[in-house]
Image: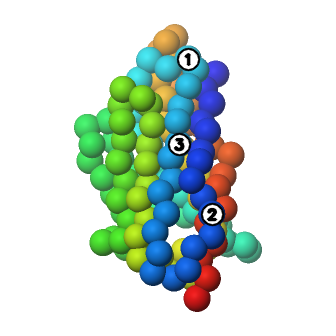
Amino acid sequence: QVQLVESGGGSVQAGGSLRLSCAASGSIFRINSMGWWHQAPGKQRELVASVNSGGRTNYADSVKGRFTISRDNAANTVYLQMNSLKPEDTAVYYCNADVTHISRSTSVYWGQGAQVTVSS
């Protein structure tokens, strides 16, 4: 079993910045890809950014140039630096991780969610 614990959400005015963190712990042999998703009220959960084990990143068009995803493999932690925030970035942000367990089985896990609210 693996747990993902998120931190760093909050409220900020448009143009401000926030940094989210997500730490994984448990029966981990290797974390493959890690990512951040967001879900606004009444909408589906959407991928914001992802990073694979080699450090290759992928971003939604809406956040390119404003958000940066990074990971610390030694700490099993993924970060999302969010700059130039806009009201439309308001959502609950979830991290996820594609984990290979010590048993060599694989599973995808989700964090508990962090509210990000951007006011105009």
Tell me which amino acid carries mark 3: Cys
Q: Which mark is residue 82?
A: none
Crowding near pointer 3: few (<14 within 10 Å), some, many (20+)? many
Q: Which residue is mark 2?
A: 10
**Residue 15 or residue 99, whichever sits in front:** 15
Mark 1 and mark 2 lie on one chain; the one further toward the N terminus is 2
Mark 2 and mark 3: Cα distance apart in space: 15 Å
Placement of the N terminus among the 4 image quadrants? top right
Q: Which mark is residue 27?
A: 1
Q: Is residue 70 above or below residue 99?
A: below
Q: Which residue is mark 3?
A: 22
Horizontal side of residue 111 vs 20, given as left or right: right
Marks 2, 3: nearer the viewer: 2
Residue 33 locus on image (x, y percent): 40, 40
Q: Is residue 74 above or below residue 66?
A: above
Tell me which amino acid carries mark 2: Gly
Residue 97 locus on image (x, y percent): 50, 38
Q: Residue furthest bottom?
A: 120
